[in-house]
Image (cartoon, coloured by chain):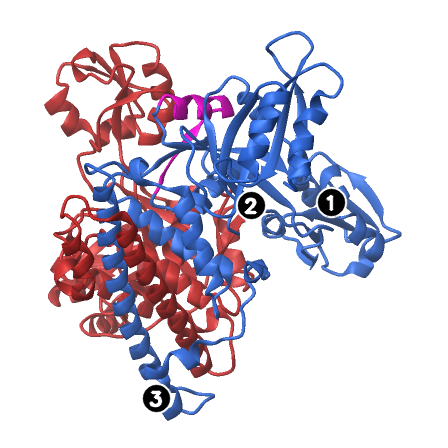
Chain colours: A red, B blue
Amino acid sequence: MAKRKLPAGKTKKPAVAKKAASNKRAVDKASPDKPDLAEVRAQIDGLDRQIQQLIAERAQWAHQVGKAKGKLAAAVDYYRPEREAQVLRRVVDRNEGPLGDETLVRLFREIMSACLAQQEPLKIGYLGPEGTFSQQAVHKHFGHSAKGLPLASIEEVFQEVAAKHADFGVVPVENSGQGTIQSTLDMFLTSPLMICGEVELRVHQHLLSRTGRIEDIERVYSHPMSLAQCSGWLRQNLPRAEKIAVSSNAEAARRARNADDAAAIAGETAAHVYGLKTIAGPIEDRSDNTTRFLVLGRELFPPSGHDRTSLLVFIRDRPGALYGVLEPLARRGISMNRIESRPAHGGLWQYAFFIDVAGHVDESPLRDALAEVGENAGDVRVLGSYPVAVL
Amino acid sequence: MAKRKLPAGKTKKPAVAKKAASNKRAVDKASPDKPDLAEVRAQIDGLDRQIQQLIAERAQWAHQVGKAKGKLAAAVDYYRPEREAQVLRRVVDRNEGPLGDETLVRLFREIMSACLAQQEPLKIGYLGPEGTFSQQAVHKHFGHSAKGLPLASIEEVFQEVAAKHADFGVVPVENSGQGTIQSTLDMFLTSPLMICGEVELRVHQHLLSRTGRIEDIERVYSHPMSLAQCSGWLRQNLPRAEKIAVSSNAEAARRARNADDAAAIAGETAAHVYGLKTIAGPIEDRSDNTTRFLVLGRELFPPSGHDRTSLLVFIRDRPGALYGVLEPLARRGISMNRIESRPAHGGLWQYAFFIDVAGHVDESPLRDALAEVGENAGDVRVLGSYPVAVL
């Protein structure tokens, strides 16, 4: 478990040499600094042949899973998020480099995605148009063999999944800068859909300027949210620079282009769009600057071993009601990631709470805690128990 | 070579069973229709471990290629398009299913992309914003480990590659519906960049309507280009329907939403965005309805074995000049994919021709033909010799 926490993209100490005894000769034969190119390529060709053979076998076995589930079914009938999460965690646990965890997880997502799509690919509704972060989240979670359906609104994503026009949906729910997207959560007040996964996309900030020299900078432009996200870094590295809030990071980059003493905080791609140089980055104070998405489905899946549960609790407005919900969880040491209160649209003086807790509803201690909550407090609806995002 | 022409995404007859002798037991043990799920999953886990091991070894060897090329270099120093094309053609040639050629090529693109990005990823400039077909072309050609730089114009893509801010650029050059994008070709009149690859993206048309029943349809809306692309299908299947040209396929879908007797020709995703049902698709008359992109770089790469060469020929306006260019090519049986004349900006009465021919400038017969053309006609500039797109 601890191994999984290595910094993303960071390569670990290469430990492949000791495993790849059969390939050792070519390296020995050539000089260690200048191995023979033709020989190295021949080795790679041999490996590619083996990889291809194994991927074909894997696809064949995945086909068997479809059979094991009954008649030859569409991908949605044998897609199992808990199983995918387990496979990916194993990939991370046994990774000894040289490729980073994130890269390997992506490759295995794609391999699984391809194997699953043999009959008919999964159809995934998301908030379009194409090219949004939501589409990136779809690809990150389901791989490129799944078929993304760009939809016009978050409401439509819920509708299309409920109507079975899409197998799953992906909707943004939380931005670590801007907080919860209330309209997404509110959909659950009336929708019967379940949450069956989460996806996290990292967002990085960079300091960009025309000259690329930090000593030139007297003003820093950015969106207020981005300035806030980088305030620690700015205090430490540019204590005397003026911070100027503008409407967007793109606008900040545009302004930084017009003066040598101005810098912008923006995504790295803005540097290239606006012809700026990167002074430093990532510079956000919290490295977990992410947007979180929920995967919507129509059913509850079994535990993956490292799960999270989202609850919707309706509470009558009487003293102690919230305590009656939280106490059984706290007493069992169940950690809570989030609690948000929303006015319920149902009745007078009722409140709804969205609560995220660790664990799966089919496993203790959460199962016991929820039974107890159900007796004492109002309605508890399980919105979903799903694997914690793997990278 | 012939094998490579199998329909994309079509699975061939599974031939894995005979190869995977070691895995035969599990299938035999369980009933052929209902194999044991746990056992199948154990097999897949074993395969995943091997695949991961081999990918790690491959990454280690790719690292050696970097060394073989001299000091430990950035990806751009040892990225070889001709080698990548060869690897992918081999993948297609030995593919016996069950996964389709296109899927396997994508997986191997990603594996190569990840191996190449170990030091520093390739930086690829393209016509932004994110989410365009150009970005899809970047990912299709360079994989997701390359870093895409969205730029504001095709001119900027050329500039950024020339200034070495980007390692390569990807620009659209031809749409099988709309023809050549002249402004892209014209950039070569003044730019020193070389073409070092091509990417093709397929585009499909579908007939969409509110009811999903073809017998209801009396009017078909679409962009004139799309109507033209599907005219054969329409003549055969909807001979009496009125064809109405509108400004875009999205507008067509919007109109089709308002009446039961109207249909739109549009991309499949429009069905979901506008809540329409698919009557039929793909319905374009030519199945090779594609957009073609060029990969821009700063150097000429060696032959891959199946290459194309783009030439820019300046001709003085005298009788027989064009013949003097084409005859040496024709006499040697060199096939020509395209010829486009453009007014050259240089001198009075001069014309420039963009000509695409089969072969590589470093190999006969093209090498000899070009030597002869250079003697008889005007200037011949080689814009690039590059691998023909692999799927």
Q: Residues within 10 Å of mark 1 (few under 14, many from 20)?
A: many
User: Could you tell me which secondary element the residue under label 1 belongs to?
Assistant: helix
Q: Earlier in the sequence, mark 3 or mark 1?
A: 3
User: Could you tell me which secondary element the residue under label 3 belongs to?
Assistant: helix
- Have a look at marks 2 and 3 and say if they share a chain: yes
Q: Nearer the viewer, residue A203 or B225?
A: B225
Give the spatial CA distance, label 1 vs label 2.
16 Å
Find disc 2 in the rendering and name its residue. B201
In reply to whether residue A323 is colored magenta, the answer given is: no
In reply to whether residue B152 is colored magenta, the answer given is: yes
Q: Nearer the viewer, residue B142 or A129?
A: B142
Q: Earlier in the sequence, mark 2 or mark 3?
A: 3
Which image quadrant is residue B346 in? top right
Q: Are marks 3 and 1 in contact (CB under 8 Å)?
A: no
Find disc 3 in the rendering and name its residue. B25
Amino acid type, callout 3: Arg
Q: Residues within 10 Å of mark 2 (few under 14, many from 20)?
A: some
